[in-house]
Image: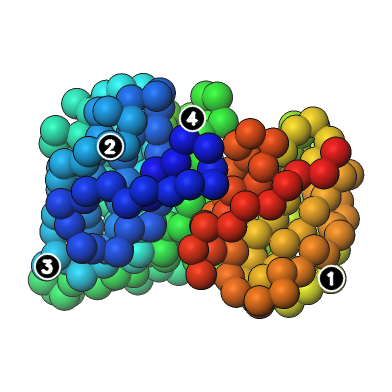
Amino acid sequence: LRSNNGIDWQQVDVPSQSTLTAVTFINNSLGWAVGHDGIILHTSDGGYTWIIQQYLPDIQKPLLDIAFKNENEGVALGAYGLFFRTMDGGKSWLQEFHTSLLSLDDLEYLAELKEEDEQVYLEERSSILPHFNRLFIDEQITFIVGEVGLIAKSNDFGKTWQRFEDIYQGSFFDLARTPKGHLLAVGLRGNSFRTLSNDAPWKGSQTGITTLLNSIVIVDEQKLFVLGNNGVLLESTDDGVSFIKRLQGDGKALLAGTIFNHQLIIASEVGIKVLQVRN
């Protein structure tokens, strides 16, 4: 869907019926979208038309996020450790497997399996990594969050990774830099964690809910929102330390959002929602 004002939306032609999960643009023209069947779509005209750059239905795994650092270098990631990289704007995508994102126990298990049975090792390796749910580029550092409490950072755009110490064993679905420069991560059962710097301990924030939290939307230097299932909309004016609940009456999931024309545009379980952002 495409809109010039955030209110009126038009369906654009897309050469696929695979479920799409994420979209990114690096300027007004160049954008990419990913989804199920390992699909990657590309637009060069601001989202009016799209072409397929990758379609891999045989892998039976969805891609869940995509990000580019410039017009050529991008990565797409998803379920069971799916990770693809392009160096030519998506004309070609190469799959990568990042053992540094495995736990120590899993690394030892794979090493033993490789010595015993190469074929079984390859089969197990294809599904042992956790789901990678979100990618966040923060200047020179790239962050990834996912299942089993995974938070990791990379200084070379995902070629090598350093895992953070486990905070909790549930999934994380988004991570963002807060208005005051701290990191905020949200996930299952209303869990929200905040750290003062890349290397400081993470501390839990009180959300007052037990619902899955999907995404973070930074409004300005004073305010941020967290979107969740069951109509949960959390507002914070103290940099993610505490939250005010603004529950939506229909109780439908709020999946992702952005600020546009002083409005909070939300992709929800029942379509697009537009909420005025109070000052």
Residue 1, above or below 115: above
Q: Which mark is residue 208?
A: 1
For the residue carrying disc 1, how many other residues have a C-alpha within 10 Å: few (<14), some (14-19), or many (20+)? few
Residue at which label 4 appears: 155
Task: Locate residue 212, reporting x and y percent.
Answer: 63, 71
Residue in view at x 60 percent, y 37 percent: 260
Q: Is residue 126 left or right of residue 244?
A: left
In terms of sequence position, does the residue under pointer 2 or pointer 3 come before the other?
Answer: 2
Relative to 255, residue 139 above or below = above
Q: Disc 4 vs disc 1: which is toward the camera?
A: 1
**Who is closer to the viewer here, 135 or 48?**
48
Q: Quote the CA–CA distance across marks 2 and 3.
A: 28 Å
Amino acid type shown at disc 3: Asp
Identify the mark nearer the N-term, 3 or 4. Answer: 3
Q: Crowding near pointer 3: few (<14 within 10 Å), some, many (20+)?
A: few
Sooner in the amino-acid sequence: mark 1 or mark 2: 2
Please indicate whether residue 272 sits to the left or right of residue 50 in the image: right
Q: Between 140 and 6, which is closer to the camera in this rendering?
A: 6
Disc 3 target residue: 58
Label 2 SS:
loop
Q: Where in the figure is residue 69, as x and y percent of width and height?
A: 40, 26
Q: Quadrant of residue 86?
A: top left
Q: What SS does tag 3 mark?
A: helix
Image mark for residue 48: 2
Q: Is residue 95 visible?
A: no
- The answer for how far apart the CA atoms under marks 1 and 2 are is 41 Å
1 vs 2, front mark? 2
Mark 1 or mark 3, which is nearer the start of the sequence?
Answer: 3
- Seen at 54% across and 47% down, the residue is 7
